[in-house]
Every structure is written in C-alpha cells, then in structure tokens.
Image: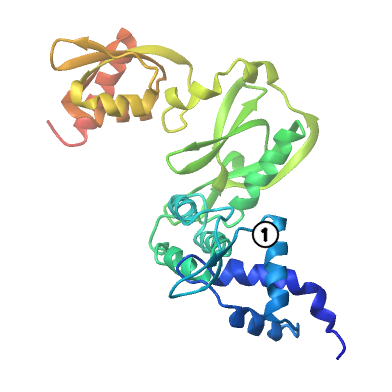
Amino acid sequence: MPRSANQKLKLLVLLRFLQRQSDEQHPVTMQQMIEELARWDISAERKSLYDDLEALRSFGADVVAQRGRAPGYYLGNRDFELPELKLLVDSIQSSKFITQRKTLALIHKLESLCSVHDAQLLERQVYVRGRVKSMNESVYYNVDAISDAITRNRMLRFRYFEFTVSKERRYRREGGFYQLSPYALLWDDENYYMLAWDGPEARFKHFRVDKMTQISAMEQAREGGEAFRALDMSAYSQHVFGMFAGVPQPVKLRFRNHLAGAVIDRFGKDVMLVPEGEERFTVTAEVAVSPQFFAWVFGFGEEAEILSPPEVREEAGRQAERIAGLYGK
C-alpha cells in the first residue's frame, strides 16, 4: 500500500494534537491519536506511535504517560502554564489602550497556547464588553511604529487628537503634524504614553499613544539624547503624576500612619518614612508639581498635607479654594 503524501507530517500532527487536546486532566489514548492521524490520511500503528512519542521527547516535548484508571498521554510542561496565561488575559482585559476587538483577538491567540479544555477556563475570564476601552483600532501598530523609530534613532512625525463633547476627533495644532524625538514608552493609569523630546521648546513631553495617528519615522536623527541620558527612568514615573510633565522638585508631605502603603506604592520602597509623633509620618520626595499631583494629595482628605516648599503649599491652598468655590461656602 503506497504511503500518503502527508506521512512526513506525522510528528507535527501528533505534537499539535497533544498540545491542543491533552492535559493532565484529559489524557488522550493511543486510539484517539490513531484516529486523528487518519483524519490527515496518515497511517499509524501502536508500535510506531511508541517510537514517535519517544522522538517527541527527544525533541524536548514533555510527553507524559499516565497509568491507572484513565490511561493515556498528555503534554506536561508547556511554554506557558495556565496561571501565567490567566495573568496575561487579565492584563490585556484591563488595558484601556487595547481596543475591544484587539483584546478578543489577543486572548484568542493566547488560548492556542494551552489545551482546548484549559482554553475554556480562560474564556470564562473574558468580560470585555462594557469596559472602558480605546476607540483607536490602530494603537496596537502605533506602539510598533514608535518602538521602531526609537530603535533606528529617528524622529517621529504624527498628528494628535482629543475628543470633543460630540465625541468627534479634534486635532491639535489645527490638524498639523508634530515632529518630535521619541525616547520611551511609559505605562501610567492603564494607558500607554510616549515620552518625546521637543527640540524647539527644549523639554520632554508626553503623548497618549491611542490618540496618535498617521505616525511615520523621519530621516532626521533624534535630538535630545543628552537630556534623556540625564533622566533616571526608573524613578521618572514615580514623580510624574498623570503624565503631567514638569520640573521635579523635593516636596515634603505629612501622612497618617495607615497611608504608608499608599505612599510606598507611589514613590517606591526606597522612600524614607520619618515618624512624627505616634500617628503620623513625613516623607520628602521628588515630584513634578501639577494639578494631578494636588488631586492625588487631596484624595486623602485631611489625612495628607503638603508641608513645603511654601510656594507648593500655597498653590495647593489656592487649588482647594477654587474647587470649594464650585460648591458654595
């Protein structure tokens, strides 16, 4: 009997069948493997399958033989364990900058990395509809374009928009293009931001990646390299609030003791907490003072207070007065 043209695919078909159909709770039998190979017009016998499974083990596949009441074979160790895939699914779901359509597509690809049985467990975690998601379908490719420009040391050209009350795009600079030097992609409050150097203004600016369109790399090399090398990127996101840029300066604050966790989450474990009495502590941190910084402090109510420098404390008071004015005396 002549051999099928698909016979050379035997090991590949067998490996994919184990990847998708088997796990520790669902081992597959020899008969199931023979039937799957037959679907591909590939002949197989039990004796030859033993050799094939051993060949897969030699290749590095963790093919486990299970004995007992439910004998069979399954793929043990995989590139991603189920808890790791669940973590990735949760991260994708909670990311605002990834659109609903791209979220579902990425999760579907992650499901292909485990058995169909475990994929059902991932599917049960998918609650995408109704969540706040980006409306810019091209954001996934924006990240790639920005990364490419950074790698090739090229300036970037793009348009930037914001939404109006009627939910329409309104482009800044009257629709004109920005021409800046990209240096980093930052993650803040579930959004992606690009950190870029503005040559004419000689300072760094932030741009929401999902609000950038018509991105293209330019022929000019990036500017601002010396300024970027002077930045401590590991600490940068700690003193910038809501991606509002500003000149970092030391600010001293006082908090109630139970807010120590919130302060460490914001400024990192290396920040020094100095006890002040039995109920409070003070901390001095580098902060880019902005309305978002004041909003963070005000969020703790009377349990947080800006102590110095005087001009920052006074500005906080003016901010509080303006807000209080909206609600009467």
Residue 220 appears at what percent x and percent y?
Answer: 80, 30
- In the image, is 58 to the left or to the right of 75? right
> Considering depth in this image, is 14 or 282 the residue closer to the camera?
14
Q: Residue furthest right?
A: 2
The answer to whether residue 317 shows anywhere in this view is yes
Q: How many badges with numbers are in the image? A: 1
> Considering depth in this image, is 282 or 77 the residue closer to the camera?
77
Determine whether the residue tagged by mark 1 lies in a helix, strand or loop.
helix
- In the image, is 167 to the left or to the right of 60? left
> Considering depth in this image, is 26 or 158 the residue closer to the camera?
26
Image position of 86 with respect to 227: above or below: below
Quarter in which the N terminus is drawn: bottom right
Residue 217 appears at what percent x and percent y?
Answer: 75, 40
Q: Residue furthest bottom?
A: 1
Quarter in which the C terminus is drawn: top left
Rendered image quadrant of residue 195: top right
Image position of 116 with respect to 193: above or below: below
The answer to whether residue 177 shows anywhere in this view is no
Residue at horizontal 69 percent and vertical 44 percent from the top:
145
- In the image, is 202 to the left or to the right of 154? left
Q: Residues within 10 Å of mark 1 (few under 14, many from 20)?
A: few
Q: Which residue position is annotated with label 1?
A: 57
Q: Amino acid at mark 1?
A: Arg
Residue at horizontal 17 percent and vertical 37 percent from the top:
327
Residue at horizontal 51 percent and vertical 66 percent from the top:
23
- In the image, is 116 to the left or to the right of 41? left
Question: How did the renderer colour the structure?
Answer: rainbow
